[in-house]
Amino acid sequence: MKKVLAMTLMLSVLVLSAGFSACSKNAQSGASKKIKLGISAFPGWFVYYIAKGEDYFKKNGVDVELVWFPVYSDSLQAFNGGQLDMLCIALPDAPAPYLKGTEFKVVAINDFSNGADGIVGRGDRGVNSLKDLKGKKVATEYGTIEHFFLLKALETVGMGEKDIELVNMSIGDSAPALISGAVDAAGLWEPALSIALADENSKLLYDSSKTPGLIQDVTVAADKLIKENPQAVSGVINAFLDAVEFYKANPDQAVEYMRVPAEVDAKTMKEIMAGGKIYGLKNMIEEMTDKKDTYLYGPYNAYQNALFLKAVDLIDEVPDDKNYFTDMFDPSFIENIAKLREVSEGPDTSLK
């Protein structure tokens, strides 16, 4: 009996030792579990597919599954429901879940829209300017950044939502609706924007190059992941930054990686990427820490969009403190990364 007890105790010690050893290795690698990162179609987020193609996640000690969402709003629901560890999200869509108690932080800014969002009209129906939208059917996804962008565009010509017939549909459905003639105009982002503009009857009325910084695109991480596995968060950000550097040095191969999830050819992919200002580490640090009352400062941008969401009754209240969303950002990851790697700008994606 004593021998049995001794052997049992010895086995227990061995199992516990192996367990502690495995935990230690996982803590060091930051890859104790697969990280699910939700992605939809937009220039800055396609860069993660360069990281996948070049094995930069593995290089940075993190196991990442890129979860593709053809319908952007589905990714928001998945993250809010705890099905994702990290998410690519338009910054204007972050305040609502944050105010409702979803626990996350913005850990990186990937890009801002520099023409990748646009209002497109049917020229054959006399829609050749924003003013021509009066009384017309305009499709976009209600409550998203594209809705906000549409209203900001209308403001430039003294109009508002009451002056149009807003048709609520997903961005993916809005482009076909425009091309088929079901609507007169649509607020779209890439690649739906390029698809719509390829139709001979379509005319670009307004795009986001006129509103620099208004539409910022970010990566958020769940508080649980930040607490339990901060190494993984750093690994994902470093993989993105490695992909940015690869893009600079190998633009053609970068486009090949990115065009696969976009389901477009290389020429169209280059046009899509030209609509975004892709961020390097320098840009990220500036826009998460350089306090100023412009859309190019993340917390200010978030607050202005929260005011919009309240105006369209998608949230009940907005705190009076304009700095309220400062705590929604966690710049510590990029600040620590900046101590270990070159702090540089993003690639030039303009068409040459």
Image: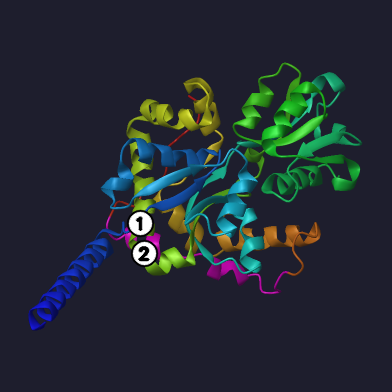
Q: Is residue 331 visible?
A: no
Observer able to see residue 336 = yes
Q: CA distance from mark 1 to mark 2?
A: 9 Å
Q: Which residues are magenta?
A: 318-340
Q: Which mark is residue 291?
A: none
Q: Horizontal and vertical percent for residue 276?
A: 54, 39
> Residue 153, how many percent across, how many down?
76, 43
Residue 172 image offset from top left, x and y in percent? 67, 34
Closer to the camera: disc 1 or disc 2?
A: 1
**What x and y, as percent, mark residue 114?**
58, 39
Residue 27: quadrant of the picture? bottom left
The answer to whether the residue labelled 1 contacts the one labelled 2, judged by CB atoms less than 8 Å apart, is yes
Q: Is residue 166 left or right of residue 327?
A: right
Q: Is residue 328 magenta?
A: yes
Disc 1 element: loop
Badge number at residue 33: 1
Label 1 sits on what residue type? Answer: Lys
Identify the residue at horizontal 34%, vertical 51% (top origin). 238
Q: Nearer the viewer, residue 347 or 103?
A: 103
Quickly name the residue at label 2: 229
SS type, badge 2? loop
Q: In the image, 312: left or right of 68? A: right
Q: Residue at x 86, y 22 (%)?
A: 125
Does residue 127 lie above or below 29 as drawn?
A: above
Residue extending farthest front: 1
**Which tag, 1 or 2, sits closer to the chain's start?**
1
Q: Residue furthest left?
A: 3
Where's the N terminus, which quadrant? bottom left
Horizontal side of 331 relative to 299 (left or right) equals left
Residue 71 colored in magenta in the image: no
Residue at (58% x, 48% y) in the render: 75
